[in-house]
């Protein structure tokens, strides 16, 4: 830290992203990326668009929002495109939280939420998950501030059925409920269908997981026109050209053949079921994940040890140095071949 660094950020604990090694090739099961590449048609569209790169991108992401709104059965006014869903989440913290309205989220969830709260100088309140790591909707009644729920949750992968989401929405008429659906395409059910019914619902999704475009940085938020206008005020006050030309073009190409992505997501779900069964045979305890990862525990290995042993064998998985989950690891679902190698290494260990 330099001596010039603002007083207000000196105690900031920034988010630690999963490792992206550059020096050697690992089987990467640590950041929930999709093992399948984006379709070739996406690359082709991007190549053509490079000719226009001297021009700024459309700050409204107009064409992309139109295509996406048709796909989702919404109006373009119900959508804002963002630079990864992280940006949309940050906008929501900026727009809806303040000193009197703390962010409210589970004690075990996406590790970026407390970071977004701190960088925006707003308080937050963590509500413990039940002992089985499910969300207890009753605990969120009159939450006192915007509720942030990853569904399926990370890193547990556990899905809260939509009745639970509805209960939280109904018990919080004066709070926005933000449902972060980064992993919903791998076996959850989207709250998008509840949008017409609840003006306090904001759904956030990403192209990083089921659509194989993590490196592109593209996400979106869907909600009432009024909520979307609030988020746009954040966009236009920080980074109007938040989604670049290549990302808008790739997003459109990707959506035009979305069935390719859905097929891959289904395949990942099948691989997840198979790996879970095989790992349970090896003595692992595993949550009921509806995401593109498994959350696992083995009594013979503290979480950090399993991560280190697999790293030595060329496989990266994730460990979180956090209370309640220190003995657990999150393992992304890769290709069948990747997972075969993982199972072989686990058996050897
Ligand atoms: C629950 C959850 N939400 C949001 C994100 C952010 O994804 P992106 O910014 O790539 O869209 C992630 C990334 O891993 C995540 O796990």
Image (cartoon, rainbow, N blue to C red):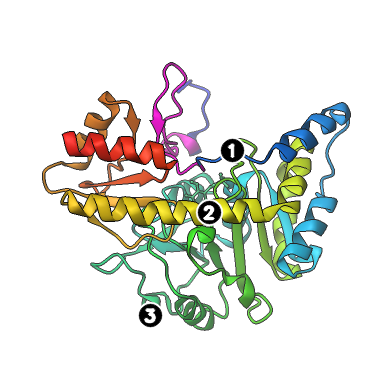
Residue at which label 3 appears = 138
Q: Residue at x 49, y 66 (%)?
A: 188
Q: Residue at x 63, y 79 (%)?
A: 198
Evaluate whether residue 54 shows in this view. Answer: no
Q: Earlier in the sequence, mark 2 or mark 1?
A: 1
Residue at which label 1 appears = 37
Relative depth, front residue between 296 and 224:
296
Q: Is residue 273 left or right of residue 245?
A: left
The x, y position of residue 344, in whole percent, is 25, 36
The quadrant where residue 95 appears: bottom right
The x, y position of residue 269, in whole percent, is 45, 56
Label ID, residue 265? 2
- Mark 3–mark 2 Cα distance, whole angstroms, equals 32 Å
Relative depth, front residue between 271 and 151:
271
> Which residue range is magenta in the image?
9-34
- Say whether marks 1 and 3 touch (CB < 8 Å): no
Q: Is residue 324 left or right of residue 103?
A: left
Q: Is residue 74 left or right of residue 157?
A: right
> Relative to residue 324, is residue 10 depicted above or below?
above
């Amino acid at each position: 830290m330099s001596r010039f660094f603002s007083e207000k950020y000196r105690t900031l604990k920034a988010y630690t992203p999963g490792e992206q090694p550059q020096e050697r090739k690992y089987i990467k099961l640590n950041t929930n990326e999709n093992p399948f590449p984006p379709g070739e048609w996406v690359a082709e569209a991007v190549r053509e668009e490079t000719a226009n790169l001297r021009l700024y991108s459309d700050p409204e992401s107009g064409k992309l929002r139109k295509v996406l709104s048709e796909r989702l059965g919404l109006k373009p006014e119900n959508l804002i495109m963002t630079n990864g869903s992280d940006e949309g989440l940050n906008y929501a913290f900026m727009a809806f939280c303040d000193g009197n309205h703390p962010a409210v989220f589970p004690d075990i969830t996406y590790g970026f939420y407390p970071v977004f709260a701190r960088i925006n100088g707003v308080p937050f309140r963590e509500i413990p998950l039940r002992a089985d790591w499910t969300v207890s909707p009753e605990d969120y009644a009159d939450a006192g501030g915007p509720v942030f729920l990853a569904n399926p949750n990370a890193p547990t992968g556990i899905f809260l059925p939509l009745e639970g989401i509805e209960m939280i929405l109904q018990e919080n008429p004066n709070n926005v409920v933000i449902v972060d659906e980064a992993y919903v395409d791998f076996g959850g059910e989207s709250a998008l269908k509840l949008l017409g019914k609840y003006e306090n619902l904001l759904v956030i999704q990403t192209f990083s997981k089921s659509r194989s475009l993590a490196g592109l940085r593209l996400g979106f938020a869907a909600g009432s026109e009024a909520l979307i206008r609030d988020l746009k005020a954040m966009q236009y006050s920080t980074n109007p050209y938040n989604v670049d030309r290549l990302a808008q073009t790739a997003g459109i190409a990707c959506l035009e053949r979305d069935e390719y992505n859905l097929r891959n997501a289904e395949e990942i779900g099948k691989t997840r079921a198979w790996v879970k069964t095989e790992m349970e045979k090896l003595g692992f305890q595993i949550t009921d994940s509806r995401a593109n990862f498994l959350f696992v525990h083995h009594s013979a290995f503290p979480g950090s040890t399993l991560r280190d042993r697999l790293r030595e064998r060329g496989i990266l998985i994730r460990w979180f140095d956090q209370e309640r989950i220190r003995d657990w690891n999150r393992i992304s679902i890769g290709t069948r071949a990747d997972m075969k190698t993982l199972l072989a290494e686990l058996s050897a260990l």
